[in-house]
Amino acid sequence: MRRLWIWGGLIGILALSAKAEEAVKLETLEVTGMTPLGAGSVPLDRLPSNVQLVTGEDLEETHSFALSDYMRNYLGSVSVNDVQSNPFQPDVQYRGFTASPLLGLPQGLTVYVNGVRFNEPFGDMVNWDLIPEGAIDHMALHPGSDPVYGLNSLGGAIVIRTKTGFSFSRHQVEGLAGSWGRHSTELSSGANNGTLGYFVHLRNFQEEGWRERSPTHVRQAFGVLSWRNDIAQLNLTLSGTDNELIGNGAVPIQLRALDHDAIFTHPDRTINRLFFSNLDGNVWVNDKIQISGNAYYRLNKNRTFNGDDTDFEECQEPQHTGFMCQEGDDEESVALDVAGNPIPASPAVDSATNNFSKTRQRGYGAAIQSAFLYDLFGMENDFVVGFSFDQAQIHFQFDTELARLTESRGTFGSGILVKDARVRLASEVTHYGAYFIEQLQPIDGLTLMASGRYNASHLVLQDKFGKALNGAHTFDRFNPAAGLTYQFMPELTVYGRYSVSNRAPTVVELTCADPEDPCKLPNAFIADPPLKQVVAKTWEAGLRGTLDELRFADDLQGRLNWHTGFFYTENHDDIIFISAGNLTSEGFFDNVGKTRRLGMEANLTGSVDNDLTGLFFQKIRFGFHYTFLDATFQTPFDAPSPNNPKAQDGVIHVEKGDRIPGLPEHMFKFNLETDIVPQLTLGMTGIYNSDRYFRGDEANLNDPLPGYWVFNLRSQYRFNDHVQLFLRVDNLFDKHYKTFGLFGQADEVLGEDFDDPRFVGPGAPRAYWGGIRLSL
């Protein structure tokens, strides 16, 4: 990682000393790409869905420290659960579908960076800390089950393009400091001479965390070398990260009531290291045909260390006296060490466990796409066809060490590893995709669109510690989509679409699907029954429009964008993680039949300009977003939930119509921003999420977590074009709120007085940060 920092610094020094012509600033257009590669750009008004766009300037001006932070505050239908209480490990939820860095959650969103699928090959998770927010040029959030974006785009796709020396032609340094010992330094530099360009972004972020024993250190290095001429362009991206994240997870609700900053057991450490390289480009064969493509290589190394409660205890049967056994077994079984010897009982091994995992993922792939812009029978017509290939070799190791709890509820290892928990798994994951998009304008204002994609996945598992996990699995499916838009006038457009997408079960899910033998997360894998792939079908329709040049008075004019729409997504053979063990991290994956996300969205954004001096503002920008989400199970099923206080013999019966845990029914957010004078900007955001049920309460038997409001402030003062000061206040009124909940056994660690099984993920308290940005 040190070499990456040196490499990035050398590029910045050389670039700063080189003479480069300033690039012409690109015009901002309301267009977006229709594919992962981003080619085939079309105006938003022609798309049969509600796509939300974010620019690099948006991220800069709001001083967001991560992409997920911006999405939480500014994008409609997005909510965030702070399961780990770490700013770089959020569960991002959109229309009831999740992109998360945590195993155990169904991953229903796909993320692309410069045309490369960024979901991890192992588990399809999204490690948000690997995406350098300061390097983002623009992002599009595509809703629905758009098949073109491939696997996991059940509820949407996040498509990111990073900066180049042609889109970012300046040099910038930013420093930030404030609450919880947080401090961050970023360097961005870009330039071009009309043919060659470079961009480099370096970041160092550290904080102690707002909860006890929860430090984080994020180091990112990102660079792009670019070439272009009148008909073609190439970009070579090199990126490296070396991050250590500690998020100590949910806390017993009784312990949180005593100390808002408290943690249960510790540590819960994740180390993410990534090397990523990508060559992408496009060329115009003529003025009607464009060919685009990319080729990439990525190497991920992930380590986790989780100190936890234990499900081992001293054996009770006379023939096993003096040895350790696993809790919960119908027939008492003696725990064995990796050499096959019974583990003697002692205070050094009876109160905690340390779970270690190590994952090495080596991925590579390529994609190619052709766009044909020939008219069809005199009608404007765009046709795109593309192919993709992705493959990854994954090596996974997992061990459980018996340990004892310390006075601070940390763990002290014994050096004794449990044989039955040991996993040594090698796997290979291969994905193929072929897609097309047809867009036709038969008459002015009417756009018809049809698309489809064929996905094929092949997973091979090889057990390196036996044969139980060996296997091969193949999944394939063709998914269609069709939609239309009709613009009656600029102020009114109607749209509608039907789309289908799928996701294949992951290596994690395929090896952790036995209700008789729940596994831990990160997973201690076992031989399991097969799972079916998930298929999502979405219907959506809505109205939208733009009101330009609104005049409220002679000196007050503005612009207004509005949208209202409905969506209906039905998942077939949905896979969820069912909490089934004694520990909060134990359970199994299972197909639970149909689930449904039904909802309504309403959005209003705009600005007001004041040309009259003497009033208290010169410009106001605003946004209001409301979402109603009815996310429910549609197939009855029984599920084990041993820690649910209202379970019958440890089992809950889920009925059709029960709400899916972790998802709010109502979401509302607003943002207001005003330029008091040209140099001074003040802004405020507000977020409301209604109540949500605990994980493990899929039957909705217990009271849900209450809803909450959170308000944030920010301001910035521009001395000139080169110097800017900014201030940000999160959770202005210091609201104590909870975003996530599940059930556990707090009394096993804290004593019998802590008999409430509810564990919660608390939201962060009030915090202040200030900083300076210097630009050349």
Image (tube, rainbow, N blue to C red):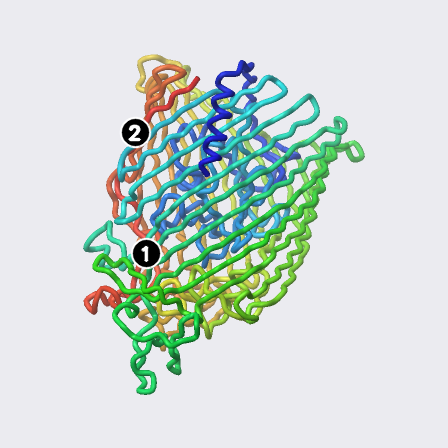
Quadrant in which the C terminus is drawn: top left
Quarter of the rendering containing residue 471: bottom right
- Is 578 situated above or below 286? below
Q: Mark on residue 352?
A: none
| Amino acid type of the residue that numbered disc 1 sits on in the rendered structure | Ala
Q: Can residue 591 be seen at all in this image of the molecule?
A: no
Judged left or right of residue 254, residue 473 is right
Q: Mark on residue 250?
A: 1
> Which residue is pictured at 38% across the width and 47% down the height?
245
Q: Residues within 10 Å of mark 1 (few under 14, many from 20)?
A: many
Q: Mark on residue 770?
A: 2
Task: Locate residue 543, reporting x and y percent.
Answer: 54, 39
Mark 2: secondary structure:
strand
Q: Are marks 1 and 2 in contact (CB under 8 Å)?
A: no
Task: Locate residue 672, reporting x and y percent.
Answer: 36, 31
Q: Can residue 703 be seen at all in this image of the molecule?
A: yes
Closer to the camera, 748 or 69?
748
| Amino acid type of the residue that numbered disc 2 sits on in the rendered structure | Gly
Mark 1: secondary structure:
loop
Closer to the camera, 360 or 71?
360
Judged left or right of residue 746, residue 701 is right
Q: Residues within 10 Å of mark 2 (few under 14, many from 20)?
A: some
